[in-house]
Image (cartoon, rainbow, N blue to C red):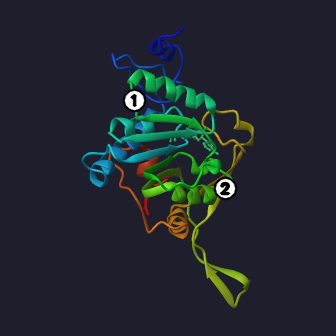
Amino acid sequence: MTDPAARALNQKWFYPFVLPDGRKLPSTHDGRVDAIHITRACMLETWLAREFPGDRSNLQAMDIACHQGYYAIQLARAGFGRVDATDVRQEHIDDVDLLRQIYALDNLHARRTNVFEMPDTADHDLVLMFGLLYHLENPVGALRKAHALTRRACVIETQVVPHLSGMVDWGSYEYVRPLKGCFGIIDEIDETHAPEASVTGICLAPSTEGLLWLLRAVGFSRAEVLPVPDDGYEQLRHGKRVMVTAWR
Ligand SMILES: C[S@@+](CC[C@H](N)C(=O)[O-])C[C@H]1O[C@@H](n2cnc3c(N)ncnc32)[C@H](O)[C@@H]1O
């Protein structure tokens, strides 16, 4: 089968993609997960309009852990001159390439790479890292990588765990340190074959307060949680996931 649209219709998709002629691509989950994708796309669009208004043709963006490229395609359609879409799984990169052909997006470039193996280039005006941090055993290393790749702003979306605060005895009750945040350990060891999962199986999910502290600690000048629309996806509305912007 060589027709790209026919190939796309013949497989299932994690995102609510629509062909240029209006036909919807089949879903891997019968649309049950669409709400989170639509809310995140809507939050990204609002933020882009405010922070990257006007002509974007001289700007470069990157989507780390792009999966089938839903947000990378959003950035390419939003007029970024070049969008690099990366993911550790080749099957996703092949899917992004198929959609690039279908949507005729010459500014979209997909390549397979592990986030930790990317060169520290700091040449992307905008870096997205959605849905990745809590699938990693080294989330701090990934935040350092995001900082190293970002020229201007980075947007991170992640599941978060409840925060713990307080003072911690640091060797003695007479020498105490404030807790800045915490991580929850999640087991994906039996799911590393899943298209959305960790590749090592050991996952550390941060608390929101910990994530904000870490973003500043790895070098971003400021970091803030983005507001969620009133009709947005429940996890984002209830602060169980967050979308955070971090500025160089
Ligand atoms: C939950 S999905 C999120 C996909 C997309 N960014 C989103 O938010 O809809 C996690 C993605 O991270 C990718 N991934 C997992 N570990 C990775 C790593 N070490 N480096 C790059 N990508 C990774 C997976 O292949 C998968 O596409």
Where in the figure is residue 128, as x and y percent of width and height?
47, 48
Residue 189: image quadrant is top right
Is 15 placed above or below 26 here?
below
Binning the other alpha carbons within 10 Å of mark 2 as few (below 14), some (14 to 19) or many (20 upward) gives some
Along the horizontal axis of the image, is 98 left or right of 187?
left
Rendering coords of residue 96 (x, y %): 50, 29
Q: Which residue is mark 1?
A: 105
Q: Disc 1 residue type?
A: Leu
* Point 47% across, 30% down: residue: 15
* Among the two numbered marks 1 and 2 on one chain, the one whose residue lies closer to the N terminus: 1
Q: Quadrant of the N terminus?
A: top right
Whether residue 21 sits left or right of residue 178 in the image: it is left
Residue 29 appears in the figure: no
What label sits on residue 138 in the rendered view? 2
Q: Which mark is residue 174?
A: none
Looking at this rendering, what residue extends furthest in the left direction?
54
Question: In which quadrant of the rendered image does the C terminus lie?
Answer: bottom left
